[in-house]
Image: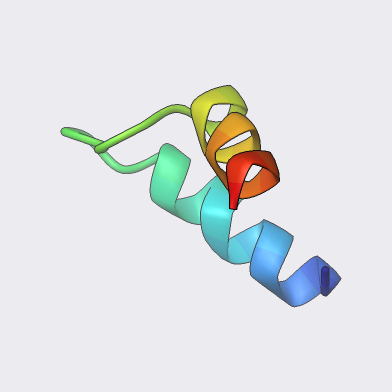
Amino acid sequence: MSSEFIEQIKAAANQPGQAMSFDEAMVWLRSL
């Protein structure tokens, strides 16, 4: 997994009204 992709997730997690938190995103990615 690229660090650039991680940064995109972190940036998305910082947006108001986010769909999921960073931790939730990590759990979701592991489940793929």
Residue farthest toward the left in the current orientation of the protein:
17
Give the residue drawn at x 26%, y 37%: 18
* Quarter of the figure with residue 1: bottom right
**Coloring scheme of the render?**
rainbow
From the viewer's perspective, is 5 left or right of 18?
A: right
From the viewer's perspective, is 10 left or right of 17?
A: right
Residue farthest toward the front in the current orientation of the protein:
32
- Can you give x and y, in whole percent of width and height, for residue 8 in the image? 56, 64
- Can you give x and y, in whole percent of width and height, for residue 6 in the image? 70, 59
* Quarter of the figure with residue 17: top left
Above or below, 13 against 12 in this view is: above
Above or below, 29 against 8 in this view is: above
From the viewer's perspective, is 19 left or right of 24?
A: left
Give the residue drawn at x 69%, y 42%: 30
Give the residue drawn at x 50%, y 53%: 11
- Can you give x and y, in whole percent of width and height, for residue 9 in the image? 55, 54
Q: Nearer the viewer, residue 13 or 31?
A: 31
Above or below, 26 against 2 in this view is: above
**Count of numbered badges drawn on the protein:** 0
From the viewer's perspective, is 5 left or right of 28?
A: right
